[in-house]
Image (cartoon, grey):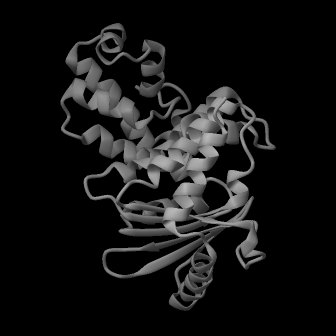
Amino acid sequence: MVEKNSEEYEGSARWVLACELQRLREESGKSLAQLAEETNYDRTYLHRLETGERLSKLPVMEALDRAYATGGLLMRLWGLARLDAFKDKYREFMRLEAKATILHTYASAIPGLLQTEGFARVVLSSATTPMDSDSIEEDVAARLGRQELLQRPRPPHVRVILDESALRRPARDPVIWRDQLMRISEAAKSPHVTVQVLPFSAGVHSLMGGSLWLLWMADGSAVAYLEGNRSGELIEEPEGVEQYRLSYDRLRDEALSPSDSAAFIEQLVEDSRP
């Protein structure tokens, strides 16, 4: 059975996933060493998934799903379990984000939806509250897990207005930073992702210092999520959502066009070459 912190996780989707991973391996008759060889993942890491100590990344779940031939069950459980890594105030937003057909965001920092693993690790390691390496890796896995929605057969339409300041504050490691710039550049070429840069010349605006998400559902309903450095607020009242949509539209009018934004980012990639 799940060994570590069973009281903490018992009854959660994460706990169910850990129990299911252990049950599937035991029923298959495979040892951890055999599973590690089959999936190319370390046996200690696989054991920690079975005890609930670690939350996996999507490629790990895909490999285990193939190994046990569960027809996508493990990936669906993982989709629920990764929500456990987020705070309660953020969890409802994550649930809605997973259902949205259209996502618009303004970000004053590179959003998790577009972060590379290396850059996400740098950002999470810079938290003011000290975190051990396991906690950092847990948060990295949870953050990267959000990007699964971009890989779906029918992904949502995403528009990102990225403040120029986010592109002018590099990671200390030039390789990590260049990889991050290339990730944004490649994402902008996707038919379902639009990236626009809000230049410094746009001046001050109402969303400075935070991030805004606008989500539209298949039924036409919409919500807004306003996030500061240490707080987040979910707005569901139509009047409130409409006000933030107007603020977003004003920023879109001031932002560079998608083609000019792509050229801007590509120049940053070029400038980052060693």
Image quadrant where one finds the N terminus: top left
Q: Position of residue 8 (x, y in %)?
A: 56, 40
Q: Indicate whether 157 appears above or below 76.
A: below
Q: Residue at x 60, y 82 (%)?
A: 244
Q: To which quarter of the image does residue 43 belong?
A: top left
Between residue 43 and residue 265, name the one nearer to us: 265
Q: Position of residue 32 (x, y in %)?
A: 36, 12
Q: To which quarter of the image does residue 218 belong?
A: bottom left
Q: Indicate whether 47 appears above or below 119.
A: above
Between residue 202 and residue 240, name the one nearer to us: 202
Q: Is residue 272 left or right of residue 252?
A: right
Q: Indicate whether 67 appears above or below 16.
A: above
Residue 2 showing in the rendered view: no
Q: Residue furthest bottom?
A: 239
Q: Is residue 5 left or right of residue 209?
A: left
Q: Residue at x 46, y 55 (%)?
A: 188
Q: Position of residue 162 (x, y in %)?
A: 61, 62
Q: Is residue 255 left or right of residue 70?
A: right
Image quadrant where one finds the C terminus: top right
Q: Position of residue 128 (x, y in %)?
A: 81, 44
Q: Residue at x 51, y 30 (%)?
A: 54
Q: How many marks?
A: 0
Residue 107 showing in the rendered view: yes
Q: Residue furthest right?
A: 128
